[in-house]
Amino acid sequence: MTAEHNRPGQPTGGRYPSSFGQSGVRARHLRAHIVVAAWLALAVSAAAAQQSLPVARWLAVHLFLLGAATTAVVVWSEHFAVALLHTELPDQRWSATRLAGVNIAVAGVLTGVWADLPVLTGAACALLVTAVTAHLVVLVRMGRGALGGRLAPIAGFYRAAAVALIAGVVLGWLLADGRVAPASYAGVRLAHLHVTLLGWIGLPVLGTLFMLWPTTLGVPMAGRTPRVARRVLALTGAGLLVAVIGLGAGWRAVAVGGVGLYGAGVALAAGLLARTARGPRPVSVAAVWSLGAAGGWLCAGVVADAAILTVRPLADAGEGVTALLLPLLLGFVAQVLIGALTYLLPIVLGGEPERRAALRATLEVGWPARLVALNAGAALSALPLPGPAVTVGAVLAVLAGAAFLMLIVGALTRGALTRGARSDGRQRPSRRPVLVGTAAGAVLTVLAVLVANSGGDTAGPSVAAGRGGAAAATTRTVEVTLADMRVRPGRIEVTEGTDLRLKVTNQDAQRHDLKVADGPATPLLTRGQSRFLDLGPVTGDRQAWCTLPGHRAAGMTLDIVVGAKAEKADGADGHDGHAAVAGGGTGPDLSGAFTDGWRSRDAVLPPAPDGRLHRVTLRAAHTDVEVAPGTKQQMWTFGGTAPGPTLRGKVGDVFEVTLVNDDHGMGHGIDFHAGSLAPDGPMRTLRPGERLVYRFRAEKAGAWLYHCSTAPMLQHIGNGMYGAVVIDPPGLEKADREYLLVSSELYLGTPGSAAQVAKMRQGAPDLWAFNGIAAQYVEEPLRAAAGERARFWVVAAGPNDGVAFHVVGTVFDTVYKEGAQLLTPDEAGGAQVLDLAPAQGGFVETVFPEAGHYSFVDHDMRHAESGAHGVVEVR
């Protein structure tokens, strides 16, 4: 069946399957369009609720893309493939089963993520992958043995799109389930956005436009269309693959190149379609304008996307690309659906040409105003305008979408009634109005749920103060920040009845919100935005989290602890409480804030002092140290710090160390690995108040450990009595930056207690750290400049664990380990890790290629995630 309104001598651009005339196929298409309309209605409903329910924005996007667009693409790609390949229509029962599987899976994904049900989310993602894979298999089989035709290459767009959706679902599941590390989250999220929007939606739209565009214009298809289609598919498919790999791996230049290839393919397709001759009367003027405007938004979006990825690091590009999502959804995806449905729905409903024209006229009512409103809304959402202007744009877009949905309902109702006529003039019963009513009921239900969930949680201070008669309760305001996939602080301790108020500020490049269980929630906050949450009197433990998919699972949570738990934490074990809580197994909150006045241990290593004799006095004593954010611990120290002071010199230098035991409760000694001498006298244990002079000559270069020599050494080293001696290798060249990092374990609790010693013997530290304080160089990063050579001296103090030192984003060109030069800059090889067993030392060197934030970690990820990590901030 050719497209209608063919004029003599003027064939249209494409032919549609004659199977549309079969009542079963037509009924299936009608049901599919009803499902699309229902998904669109739900998306509009969620969009209308996003101001009061933060997760509604995410829900609206996925209802639109994963619900409406996916259903439309699955149905039409199959039937367009039949026309393009001149093959038989697949078994419609199995087609219906696949489509049902897709929609059930989509509903499961949305419900699982919204309700935070990981098992349901995973199962639904698996079902969606299975259904789409089955769809891909059908498309591939249709191409085998088909008669084909000059338009057969266009079917390749549909197969590539199915592969893209499978990849997008897998990436989306990884994000939603929290399986992506915070450092990789931004890149994987960008990969997910690109493969879904440009792959699953963009590719089939481009392919279909080669046929649909001239058909809606009522003009012949250009003779070079098949050749151009092959080139466009090669460019866009390869470009998308390169871009997704680059984004997922964090290779920005590769990602930009991939988007550039994709853009070249879009430009090639746009050039062909723009040169298509226009006839005197298009079949549907409204469809032509919608499809043309959609193509313009796609071109503009790809250019803007490439520009954002070019000028911004991937960690910061997410916000810019996310800002493009709404205008692309409105300008590109929505207008493609509107244009396609305006033209195709009357064909699906069937009947005589006059009847189709009447149905199309129903769908075209007010199309100029709707077109202007939708594109104005897309433009306002794309421009950097104040909030009210963006709100006006959202309202215009929602009104345009709602108006078209009403027209669809009218067309479906009208089509159902007219097709119900029998030859005797009476009406046949029709289930289609029932389906329309069901879709409308679903819309009303979701609207009610959204309104119910968004109400009552945004009470201001006056309401919160009056709840439960607690106006006289203690009021406390806590500043909460959202950044780096963490909520800081991650734990707030209050007494029962405290009237708690949170000032929530987003300091991250991407948007976040904060939702309190059974309580208020912030809207989505951009960088720098703040909102207050009034919880009222807190009488029980509460939890808060970021509601964006995957963020809670990735660690963006806040625990509010009240009553006896907080009191026990404040006084247990004779300390400030943090050590007792951590030692009890819950662990300190590494995302929290250090106390006022805290300063990090300076990791910069000064050059070796002049002279051949170096004198130093070390005093052994107990010292309270903040070993993690807000967590203080009594440590046994040399010189008041753990690790103790660093000694540096050259081969042949003499060190004269005076050790004074100022600890009134126990004996201490010292052992310098850098010296060679009989240990009997210099390493003896000093009673409280005693002193000795430890003199040794540094005969060998290296990074050496010193530690307490008194038994049990496990406890003395484990409680902080260790330090480093750096002896420069002869001829050591000057580096632009030199740092010293001493790795160690931290065992919290009362030093020497049975519980602490048990953890030491079991090798179960509470934390791992560089230079004695967990995560300190996240709070106060090390500094460097692009192009500078940086040397990292590393010593593994243990007492039980070594270290695998790694700097993310760099390659070591120099490795010196245990007195041996293993790698120099003039060699072809590189190194990724400096691996040291307990008590070993060495250094590595690298050159920072560009400005940015380079994380350094112990690549034993248990250690890294429990404090052995930091950042080098490169200007």
Image (cartoon, rainbow, N blue to C red):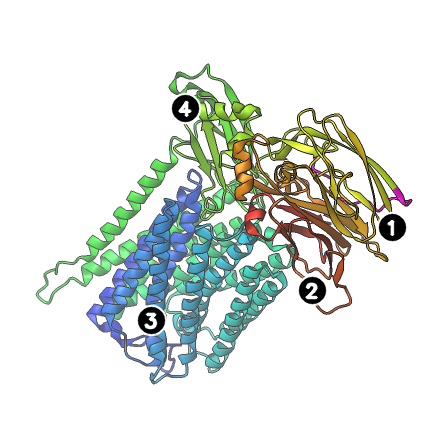
Q: Position of residue 283 (x, y in %)?
A: 37, 69
The earlier-in-sequence mark between 4 and 3 is 3
Q: Earlier in the sequence, mark 1 or mark 2?
A: 1
Of labels 3 and 1, the one closer to you: 1
| Image: magenta residue range | 599-613
Badge nearest the viewer, 2 or 4: 2
As displayed, is residue 634 above or below residue 865? above
Q: Amino acid at mark 2?
A: Gly
Q: Is residue 41 above or below residue 490?
A: below
Residue in the foreground of this view, choosing between 559 and 572: 572
Q: Which residue is mark 3?
A: 78
Cα distance between the residues tagged 3 and 2:
51 Å
Q: N-terminal of the two: label 1 or label 4?
A: 4
SS type, badge 2: loop
Residue with the mark numbered 2:
830
Tell me which numbered mark, 2 or 4, is placed earlier along the sequence. Answer: 4
Residue 875 appears at what percent x and percent y? 73, 49
Task: Depth check: give the residue in front, 127 or 755.
Answer: 755
How far is mark 4 from mark 3, CA to CA? 58 Å
Residue at image mark 4: 539
Q: Is residue 641 above or below residue 855?
A: above
The residues bearing labels 1 and 4 have C-alpha atoms spaced at a distance of: 67 Å
Amino acid under label 3? Glu
The answer to which quarter of the image holds residue 155 is bottom left
Q: Position of residue 234 (x, y in %)?
A: 51, 75
